[in-house]
Image (cartoon, grey):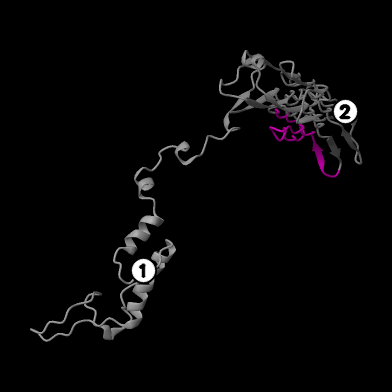
Amino acid sequence: MDYPKSMPSVGLVNGWFVDENPVVGTPGSLIPAVWGNSVTQEILSVIKAAGLTPDEAKTDQLAMAIGALVDFTKMKNTPTTLSGYGITDAVGRLLAVKQFDTVGITVYRPNPKTKRIRVRLIGAGGSGGGCGPVAATYQSLGGGGGAGAYAESLYDVTAEMQAGVPVSLGAGGSPRNTTGLAGGGASFGSYMSVAGGFGGQILTFLVTATSSAFIQGGAGGQAVTGGNLASARGIPGGYGMSNSNWGVLSGTGAASPFDGGAPATGVNGNGYTGLRGSGGSGACSTNASASCLSGAGGNAFCEIWEYE
């Protein structure tokens, strides 16, 4: 609803109705029937919406209708809390995410408000296969280290947990110039445990104009206990490969749920280190005087989500 601005004959001045001025001879504004009806209908709509019957003799029905439709007392006393609107704090709210990556034993104590925890645990990754000095016309290939086994659980927090749960994390397999080493396991108290991944294999072979070779990576961690949401064996490390047409490439470290695994390396380069349970990459070499070390496996890792 608005003034009848679209009707020039109405005679609005600055958008408003004006009275006739006999002194200066200016006529007053006209009120068109369509506009008058529209204004009346706007008012009647409010009165009817409040459940009142329009009465020509009454002049307070619009105020009564507005009072019936709007609770002014509630508007003047607007609640300042969720409970004021009848809303209670939700249960299951995420309080914090805590991460543990220190090798050894760390005691975990939940936030006092914590009612439930989600625990994600992975064993350490194995190191890749490394290369010692290689005799002339020979080549060595190392496979990637395997990833640690993975477990995940959801627990209601007990008084025993509130007292403290030991989180034990093993170290990743160390760099090698021969077959890779397995990573250490991990455990969340007596509730869950996972094994570490195995080290990558190594192959030394005679190079010819048509030679090709490959060597497997280490197996993923196999043993998993206690996971009530997930219990998964680790992913195996990648194959080291050589071909007379395109060259040499070491095996990649296996991926973990927390890391993509160490990338492959070319000939006569050291391997790369894995992270958070992933495997280290292998090495490949034709160097007769020096070793090419593999990449270390990623240390075991634990992540705990606390819920109210």
Q: In which quarter of the image is residue 58?
A: bottom left
Q: Where is residue 132 in the image (x, y as percent from the top left)?
A: 80, 22
Of marks 2 and 1, the one in the foreground: 1
Q: Report the front residue among 228 and 39.
A: 39
**Amino acid, disc 2:** Leu
Residue 235 at x, y percent in the picture: 80, 32
Task: Say which label, 2 or 1, has the lower sequence index.
Answer: 1
Q: Give the range drawn in magenta.
A: 245-274
Residue 185 figure quarter: top right
Of residue 162 and residue 75, the one placed in the foreground of this image is 75
Residue at (92% x, 41% y) in the render: 210
Numbered mark located on residue 43 in the image: 1
**Residue pointed to by mark 2:** 203
Q: What count of labels does the image hold? A: 2
Q: Which residue is drawn at 81% across and 40% down?
A: 247
217 within the magenta span: no
